[in-house]
Image: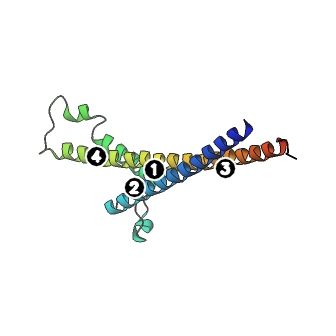
Amino acid sequence: MIRKLAILLSIFGLVAIIMGGVFIGMGMTKSHVLTQAMRVEKITLGLTQEQVDAGDILDTAGEALKAGDTIREHRHSLAPTYNDLLAGGRFDPTNPDHVTYMQALNLENYLYLAVIGFSLTQTVTASGVFMIIAGVAFGGTGLALLRLGRLSEPRAG
C-alpha cells in the first residue's frame, strides 16, 4: 500500500512540476507580449522629460496605472461622467469635447487593461512557481515513502 501511495505521489509531483513550468512559461510569454504592445504605442504620459529624452516609454503595470489615473483626472475636467458630457443629448462626432472625451476614455481603458493583464501574468507565474514547489514536495514525499516502504518490507532468505 505504501509503495502505491509513493508512486502516486511521485507521479503527482512530476505532473505538478511540468504544469508549473508551463504556467511560468505562459506568464512570462504573455507579459512579454504586453510589454511589446505597450512599447509599440510609445505612450510617455506621466514620465519626466528626462525619461522621455532617454527613450523610456510606458511598459509596466505601475506606469500604466499612473498614466490611466492621470488621463481619468484630465477626462473628468471635461465632464465628470459621460452623461454629463452629453447633457441629455447624443454623441456628436463634430464636437471636439465629445471626441476628446472618447479618445481619453479609450486610452484610459487600454492602460487599465494593461494593468490587469500584467497582474494576471504575475498571478499565473506565481501559480507556476507554487506548482513547482508543491511538485517537489510531493515528489520528495513519494520518494521518502518509497524508501520507507523498502525498509519496512520483510526480507527474503
Q: Is residue 58 visible?
A: no
Q: Are marks 4 and 3 in contact (CB under 8 Å)?
A: no
* Crowdedness near tag 4: few (<14), some (14–19) or many (≥20) residues, C-alpha within 10 Å: few
Q: Are marks 2 and 1 in contact (CB under 8 Å)?
A: yes
Which mark lies nearer to you, 1 or 4?
1
Q: Nearer the viewer, residue 152 or 23?
A: 152
111 to the left or right of 121: left
Precedes in sequence: disc 2 or disc 1: 2
Q: Name which residue type carries label 3.
A: Val
Q: Nearer the viewer, residue 9 or 133?
A: 9
Q: Name which residue type carries label 4.
A: Asn
Residue at screen point 50% across, 47% down: 124
Question: Could you tell me residue 130's position as x and y percent?
Answer: 60, 46
* Mark identifier at residue 34: 2
Question: Could you tell me residue 90's position as x and y percent?
Answer: 14, 33
Precedes in sequence: disc 1 or disc 3: 1
* Location of residue 79 by image quarter: top left
* Mark identifier at residue 78: none
Q: Is residue 11 visible?
A: yes
> Element under label 4?
helix
* Mark identifier at residue 118: 1
The residue pinned by badge 4 equals 106
Q: Is 88 situated above or below 17?
A: above
Q: Name which residue type carries label 2.
A: Leu
Question: Could you tell me residue 99's position as x and y percent?
Answer: 19, 46
The residue pinned by badge 3 equals 136
Precedes in sequence: disc 3 or disc 2: 2
Residue at screen point 14% across, 44% down: 95
Q: Are marks 2 and 4 in contact (CB under 8 Å)?
A: no
57 to the left or right of 152: left
